[in-house]
Image (cartoon, grey):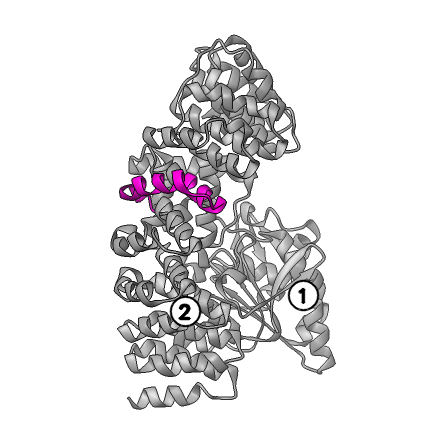
Amino acid sequence: MSDLSEFVAKLEAADETERVYAAEDIGYLNAAEGVAPLVARLDQEPSRAVRDAIFQALTRIEADAAVEGCIRLLASDDPQIRNQVVEILRHKGAAVVPFLETVMREGDKDLRKLTLDVLSGLPAVSANAIYQAALSDPDPNVIITAVENLGRARAHRFKGRIEELLLAASHPMLIGACLEALVGIGDEDSLAILRRRFPDFSMLPDFFLVSCLKAIGALGTERDFAAVAALLAERGTQLRPAILSALVGIHARHCGAAHDDNLLPLLRLAIDDLSAPLCSYQAVRALGFISSRDDVYAFLIGCLTSPERLVRLASIECLRETKRPELDEVLAARALSETDEDVRQALRS
Amino acid sequence: MSEISVEQFKRLSQHIYQKLGLHFDEKKIYFLKKRVEKRMAALQIAEPEDDVFMVGYADPLGLEMQELANLVTTNETYMFREYEQLQAFANHCLPEVLSTKLARDDRSLRIWSAGCSSGEEPYTLAMIVQEVFPQAHSWKCQIIATDIDENVLHRACEARYGERAVAEVPEEYRKKHLVEDGEEWLVREKTAALVEFRHLNLNDRMAMRAMRGFDFIFCRNVLIYFDDQSRKAVVDHFYNALNRGSYIFLGHSESVGRISTAFKLKRFEDHLVYIKE
């Protein structure tokens, strides 16, 4: 322990670099006894570099004492300390779950929320009990964070509970979180529940509509395509990315009926507005839904000379989906005059 | 195989930024899509959502992220790479540090090129230093270039490069600092003499502690190959190796602030740089 005493003493050195090295050396000693002096030093340490070194040392120490020390720091008034400690606990992985169960039972609402922040980087399966408790928590922020985590972690076993929450919730953030979670773990039942909750999404406020569109993009069918596309004309341009993502999402799973004459003019609203290249890109990709039509095919060929490279790239991707026999020759000819390297490569591949 | 949607691109690029510090804006959607699709094919993953999930939430050791790093970065290195960053160094940071030193009558300048590979970066810095600061040879001016790979260091010491490596060197610099030798280019001796190559493992903490007193550290496109913990440890060592008022440069799309809170962000016109205050 003589090394430890020496390093602990150096934590008080006047020279910043000495203190950094002391913290680092304590971390490499990997001894439980090193935790308390590191935690104690954090409160008074003015240097961010030394603080960073202390956080790294706490990450490096494998003993339970390091987890316990970090959990005590979750209650710190300093947001930097709280954020860093969340990162450290995440880094330590599933081993921290039993400790967090205690925090979830005994901690206040802020600690319960931070517990879920730690879990957001861990597989949900290791923390079933915590999530069960969190979904019935009296604090909405705790429930929202739990739902977000479960959606991101694709915890399918919580799908039913999240659908129940969607039907019953009144907190807008919770509704949004439920919708977004169902994007990852929902199925056709979830889509039915979404429709029950929001029978007419054309009238929804923007905030809910964005989340609904994500869910429809992930779960909707070819029947939804035209109704979603109609929103391009009905709603403001700020919703275009969400509408177009939903269309591309549906198209990724379904091919459209070629008879809808309204789709090309609707999508052109976004394609022709080159001030938002990513929207133009998505709109061209959504055209793939009806690319079997001759007028759409001709339009896509025209897009190969668009001044916007993302439009050219998207049109190549759509055209390739048509599998027309003459296409390779058309694209190869176009490659001769193309100047952008990515586009040229796409034309030739 | 389904293609990656814009939504998935955004989430994936967010994961890549969080883990590797590499920023992919929307103009890079096609670039990233194609590389990820290639990786998905290799792993026989049909659904992009599965790949995004794996990279984000089912890769505790960061192995898949590392594979992705190899696909989205280039090992190619050449002189005057990431020119804008070098402009910030040449036009703002270097003059500022030199004038502070002159005021203190300190006539030394130390630059560290960490992970210098075959030497293109340190020789680039040697050219810039001489152009911005012609008195460099009358000062104690050192560019220490380190790498873990002794083979590349041997190549770097030869100071001999093919056309691709020197293609971006401005014409007036090329005339002054390079000499043509058949199909290759040699760095002129006066310029090469400013650079000292050393073997160094950035993960060797005791060796890193010996690196002190630098005015600039360049470690561009190196740390993306490190795991989180090692990356933080290396940047902490860089902090200790720098003098106060000195600058660190990571790759153009890497963020120092994401790795360490110790440095301060400073703006020079359009350039953002990190300084040890």
Q: How far apart are labels 1 and 2 at the CA level?
A: 39 Å
Crowdedness near tag 1: few (<14), some (14–19) or many (≥20) residues, C-alpha within 10 Å = many
Which mark, residue B93?
Answer: 1
Q: Position of residue A127 (x, y in %)?
A: 27, 55
* Residue B197, position as x, y percentages in the image: 49, 67
Residue B134 on image: x %, y %: 72, 67
Task: Kindly identify which chain the residue marked by label 2 belongs to.
Answer: A
Q: Is residue B252 left or right of residue B60?
A: right
With respect to residue B169, does A47 lie above or below?
A: below
Q: Secondary structure at mark 2?
A: loop
- What residue is disc 2 on? A74
Q: Is residue A46 above or below residue B252?
A: below
Type of amino acid at the residue the image marks with label 1: Cys
Predominant SS of the magenta segment = helix
- The disc at residue A312 is none
Residue segment shown in magenta: A153-180
In the rendered view, does B68 fall on the left or right side of B42?
A: right
Asked whether the beta carbons under mark 1 and mark 2 sit within 8 Å of each other, the answer is no
Front residue (pair A144, A64):
A144
The residue at 56%/36% (across/down) is A206
Image location (x, y in percent) of residue A29: 31, 79
Q: Which quarter of the figure is the N terminus of chain A placed in?
A: bottom left
Pick whichever, B182 or B191, lies toward us. B191
